[in-house]
Image: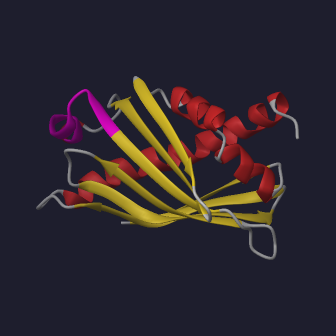
Amino acid sequence: MRIHETVEHDATPQQVFDMICSPEYQELKCARSGALEHEVAIEVEDDARTIVTRRRLPTEGFPDFARKFVGDAVDVVETQVWGLTSDEDGGHTASLHVEIPRTPVSMSGSVFLAAGGAGTEHTVEGELKANVPFIGGKVEAAVAPVLARALRLEAKLSPEWFEQNPA
């Protein structure tokens, strides 16, 4: 299943990039996502910044067939690898991989920060796959809204973040 979601932030692409790459922001994002527990790791290399978040999320609101498959909670590991240099318009790009360990569900794609709208358009696009015979499409349809909510959460958190962390 193809995923394409965009939200806007009232800040420059560089400011949004700095926010996303902040350990404190990633901690806030995990906590506000309803994680029962979480870990954040950020590694800076010569030409990249790798952000890995591990969250245990409750499955309340999942369809019954999906809850039978994963139980009361699901682990989600999100890895973003950002290039440290921006493009000529100030935008940033990352590769994205989301996996749900012990399940056949994963997503691979990209994250883009580009000038536009009120400041920055934050776009996630990729391919969500559930390698489950007969019900893979139903599993993908159940997971896709969860991924969209996660990106919309970032749009809700950014005004609070910038208010508390002025440039």
| Most distant residue in the left direction | 133
Q: Nearer the viewer, residue 116 or 47?
A: 47
The residue sitting at 19% across, 44% down in the picture is 102
Q: Residue 91: x percent and y percent?
A: 74, 67
Q: Please report the bounds of the magenta region as a residue range.
A: 66-75
Please check the rendered image and state whether residue 44 is part of the magenta-colored stretch, yes or no: no
**Can you say whether 3 is above or below 165 in the image?**
below
Residue 165 in view of the camera: yes
The residue sitting at 20% across, 37% down in the picture is 70
Q: Residue 62: x percent and y percent?
A: 31, 36
Location of residue 76 by image quarter: top left
The residue sitting at 47% across, 26% down in the picture is 34
Tell me if 78 is positioned left or right of 106 in this view: right
Residue 3 in view of the camera: no
Tell me if 65 is positioned left or right of 22 in this view: left
| Most distant residue in the bottom direction | 88
Q: How is the image coloured?
A: secondary structure
Q: Residue 58: x percent and y percent?
A: 35, 28
Please check the rendered image and state whether residue 72 is part of the magenta-colored stretch, yes or no: yes
Q: Residue 115: x percent and y percent?
A: 80, 65
| Most distant residue in the front direction | 46
Q: Quadrant of the C terminus?
A: top right
Q: Quadrant of the N terminus?
A: bottom left
Q: Nearer the viewer, residue 112 or 147?
A: 112
| Most distant residue in the top direction | 36
Q: Nearer the viewer, residue 62 or 46?
A: 46
